[in-house]
Image: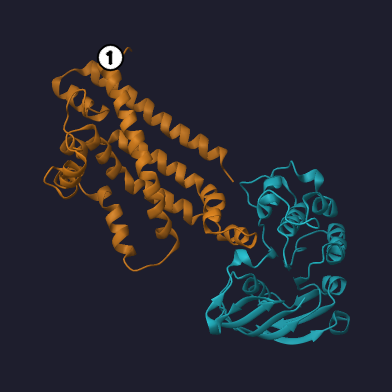
Chain colours: A orange, B cyan
Amino acid sequence: MSLTQAEWQIIGFTLAACALSTLVILPFGLAVAWPLARYRWPGKLLVETLVTLPLVLPPVATGLLLLKFFSRRGLLGQFLHKQLGIDVVFTWRAVVVAAAVMSFPLLVRSVRVGFQSVNQRFEHIARTLGAGDARVFFTVTLPLASRGIVAGVVLAFARAVGEFGATIVVAGNIPGKTTTLSLEIFETVQLGHDASAYRLLIVSVIIAFGAVWLSEALMKKSAL
Amino acid sequence: MKLEIRELSLRLEQFTLELDVDLQNARTGIFGPSGSGKTSLLETIAGLRKPETARIRLDNCLFEDTEQAYSLPVRLRRIGYVPQDDSLFPHLSVRRNLLYGTNGKSKHDTFSFDHVIGFLKIGSLLARDVRSLSRGENQRIVIARALLSAPRLLLLDEPLTALDASLKETILQQLRSLHHEFGIPMLYVTHDPVEANDICEEILILESGRLLSRGNPRELLG
């Protein structure tokens, strides 16, 4: 099986966009999952619902919302275009945004479970040993929650690679610009280019397999 | 040492822990059956539980005064806490566990790494994985970690539970000489009269959150 140059470009672009989206949502995922896991506060249910929404909304509907939000007349799109000269819709940025929004719920869910699994006794002991909140979080909580965090990162990345509905609405399928693996598989099937579709299918399976294998290996390594 | 615990009231599931005492002995035991509030008392002194009312002071350092809505953060209390359950950080090596409270450097000659390690005879355990330690080894590392943070007060919560007799005796010997070696006062929670007799100059007997009596362990426990 040999891939064409265009297929290599699509694979490289997809992996880079998905890695970037996962990297971008990681700090936000940690920041949202932490209070959800540890505290009771007014509005918690609302935040939980909003975070889960992309998981249950039709992806195309999420894409449409993003289109409205990031278009040049949209709430954020207008600001980005006028103040910073940045366009999002129908660019590579839209691919990253769609992947980030669609994979965010999976990241938060997994990280939240990770934080919940940490025995708070260890955090208490760290405090008696003179550690402040930040030190306790970075040296005790975060490492002990690492299995959930790693699992969340891998799940989010895999979900981003498979993203289709929201991406096609907000980023389109512009060859060499916004075409991802999923969009290209759809396109080649539509056009009857079965050989290319199957090559990309195999690549998708390899990426998915690799992601899960890596996650398992990392989790075993950090197993407590 | 003078530990003042005034008007302490801490609501627990079965009862309210109520205490009003001054402790001045270097080795004081908190004695009583399981579920009498011993661990909750230690956790309150350490700052890990928030009492309904209390004024707690160790020498010149105010820990808690609910009337003034004051609570000294746990990290600033300088309490060496040895809990009943396993408490070594499972993701850190034995050495890094020991150094956690020192920030990598010794704060005081008395509590230097070599002195503490030599005193507790745990030098051979430094390279071991935390998960491979026996219960007795684990407890000695926890005590050493607490000592290395140069505490003002050591709180020991049934540290010898589930240890076999010979190991218990070895650690008891170390605990007996600990005050002499490091000059740290300790509160020692136990429900074992032998341990209380062996280690403590004075004991407080708790039952259902109330102080039943206090005094010499030999007189009270026989």
Residue farthest toward the front in the current orientation of the protein: A83
Task: Residue A224 in the image: state x and y as whole percent.
Answer: 59, 46
Residue A191, image x and y in percent? Answer: 14, 21
Please tell me which residue is depicted at 85% across the width and 60% down the height of the picture: B174
Residue that carries the numbered disc 1 in the rendered image: A5
Residue furthest left in the image: A73
Q: Nearer the viewer, residue A174 or A207?
A: A174
Would residue B66 be seen by someone viewing this image from the given angle? yes
Decide if residue A110 is on the left or right side of residue B167.
left
The chain that hosts pointer 1 is A
How far across and how far down the image is residue B109, in percent? 80, 55
Residue at 15% x, 44% y is A64
Res. A199 visible in picture:
no
Q: Residue shown at 68%/53% (left/top)?
A: B102
Q: Nearer the viewer, residue A125 or A181?
A: A125
Return the x and y of residue A189 as percentages of the image width and height: 18, 23
- Give the image quarter of residue B148: bottom right
Count of numbered badges drawn on the protein: 1
Please report the residue visible at 75 percent of the width from the left and 64 percent of the height from the top: B161
What secondary structure is found at the residue carrying circle 1? helix
Looking at the rendered structure, the kind of residue marked 1 is Gln
Give the quarter of the figure containing the C terminus of chain B.
bottom right
| As drawn, B110 above or below B96 | below
Label 1 environment density (alpha carbons within 10 Å; few <14, some 14–19, many ≥20):
few
Q: Nearer the viewer, residue A158 or A124?
A: A124
